[in-house]
Image: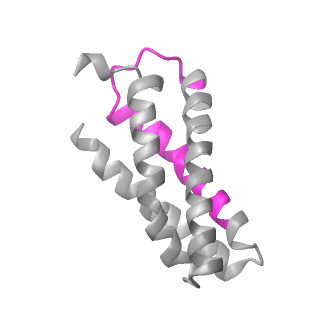
Amino acid sequence: MANFSGLALFTFLGDITLLFLLLTYTPLHYVIATACAFWIALSANYFLTRKYTFTGTERALHTGYVIFMGTALVGLVFVLGIMTILIEHLHFDPLVARVCSASAGALWNYFVNLKYNFKVVDKE
């Protein structure tokens, strides 16, 4: 499980970098830019996590990806909800709001995937 924190940090930095680039160089609204950056970073995270963290998974690659991204969609709803509150009501910068909202999405994705997607929780 030691690889998880490094991969999570790598994914988060990729997410924030993509969000910065999208907000700086495209006319995308922060909600669309956040969703795009999140989806791209999480897709990369799935393949890295599957290979390096959850090596004992019994689930097929494509099935696992669909489940992983489905649970990530719920995490994205949390992230966007928190960001909207922080940006629209508390006037946070979108990048700062994304950093603040990161823990909710990360915790959701990790625990749901640990228990239901990669199915390794009983092996540890």
Q: Is residue 22 magenta?
A: no
Q: Position of residue 78 (x, y in %)?
A: 56, 54
Horizontal side of residue 51 vs 40, given as left or right: left
Please provide percent x and percent y for residue 32: 72, 64
Nearer to me, 47 or 116: 116
Q: Residue furthest right?
A: 27
Residue at 54% over, 34% down: 68
Is residue 51 within the magenta segment? yes
Image quarter where the C terminus lies is top left
Task: Look at the image and name its color scheme.
Answer: one colour
Q: Nearer the viewer, residue 89 or 122?
A: 89
In this view, 56 is above or below 19: above
The main secondary structure of the magenta stretch is helix
* Farthest-out residue, front: 89
Q: Is residue 34 above or below residue 90?
A: above
Q: Quadrant of the N terminus?
A: top left
Q: Position of residue 64 (x, y in %)?
A: 54, 25
Q: Position of residue 39 (x, y in %)?
A: 61, 51
Q: Who's the residue at 53% across and 76% down the image?
A: 95
Point out the stretch of residues depicted in magenta. 33-62
